[in-house]
Amino acid sequence: DQQVKQNSPSLSVQEGRISILNCDYTNSMFDYFLWYKKYPAEGPTFLISISSIKDKNEDGRFTVFLNKSAKHLSLHIVPSQPGDSAVYFCAASGVNRDDKIIFGKGTRLHILP
Amino acid sequence: NAGVTQTPKFQVLKTGQSMTLQCAQDMNHEYMSWYRQDPGMGLRLIHYSVGAGITDQGEVPNGYNVSRSTTEDFPLRLLSAAPSQTSVYFCASRRQPSTNEKLFFGSGTQLSVL
């Protein structure tokens, strides 16, 4: 039973265009959401996060949008750059304070020249 | 600042062998955890610890043991390795449990069980 779902295993985007990565969750108790980026042979690194009290958080080229009613969040990268080619993981944690952070399966983003 | 350090980076085991994956952090983080990454499965939580002497199970704990005798170290033990445990293992930590903070990951251990 997947609590955090990333339904697109891969995505290809032209350099300079917008990349949109999507994530859905099923557990209404989640109140904090994170995006991680992972390059091959490296550990995941934190990218951006959003609390459930917000619907948008921006950090440079990266913006995360949260739609609580739809249990959906998305990561926008504008403009996309070659170094953005990586696997992106969506993750969530909850108000129950059981300390678990649950990850999705990831989306591999390819930025095309 | 080393952050989260995992050893070894690569390991090959035979079915039935035991081994310990080491994880150490130098950030004085209370919370530590172990994940495994498998193709098409993402990152799945194995075990986690909210402080020295306290551990709990994650999503896929079977076949793994952990202990937390110090704040810095959180080893993951495979008592009798199975081919299904072939995976990439990541240790991660964050400053405190029960807070909305990001995890810091180590660089991973690639384990193959033959």
Image: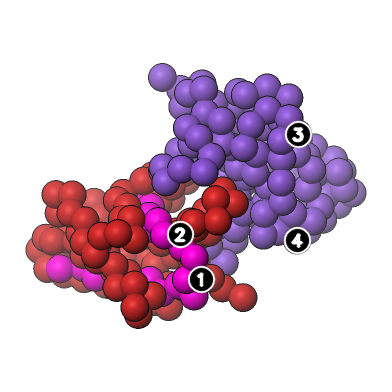
Disc ID at residue A42: none
Of tags 3 and 1, the one toward the viewer is: 1
Dot 4 and dot 1 within a common chain: no
Q: Look at the numbered disc 4 and give the secondary structure of its residue.
A: helix
Q: Look at the numbered disc 1 and give the secondary structure of its residue.
A: loop
Nearer to me, B48 or B91 = B48
Which chain contains the residue that carries disc 2? A
Which chain contains the residue that carries disc 3? B
Dot 4 and dot 2 within a common chain: no
Q: Which chain is red?
A: A
Residues at marks 4 and 2, CA–CA distance in whole angstroms: 26 Å
Q: Position of residue A33 (x, y in %)?
A: 38, 58
Of tags 4 and 1, the one toward the viewer is: 1
| Residue stretch rendered in magenta on the structure | A18-37
Dot 2 and dot 3 within a common chain: no
Q: Eyeballing the image, is B11 above or below A110?
A: above
Identify residue for label 2: A92
Of tags 4 and 3, the one toward the viewer is: 3
Q: What's the amino acid at mark 4?
A: Ser
Q: Is residue A78 left or right of residue B51?
A: left
Disc ID at residue B67: 3
Determine contact: label 1, label 2, CB under 8 Å.
Answer: yes
Of tags 1 and 2, the one toward the viewer is: 1
Q: Is residue A42 left or right of residue B68?
A: left
Which chain contains the residue that carries disc 1? A
Identify residue for label 4: B84
Chain B display color:
purple
Identify residue for label 1: A27
Q: Residues within 10 Å of mark 2 (few under 14, many from 20)?
A: many
Q: Is residue B81 left or right of residue A89?
A: right
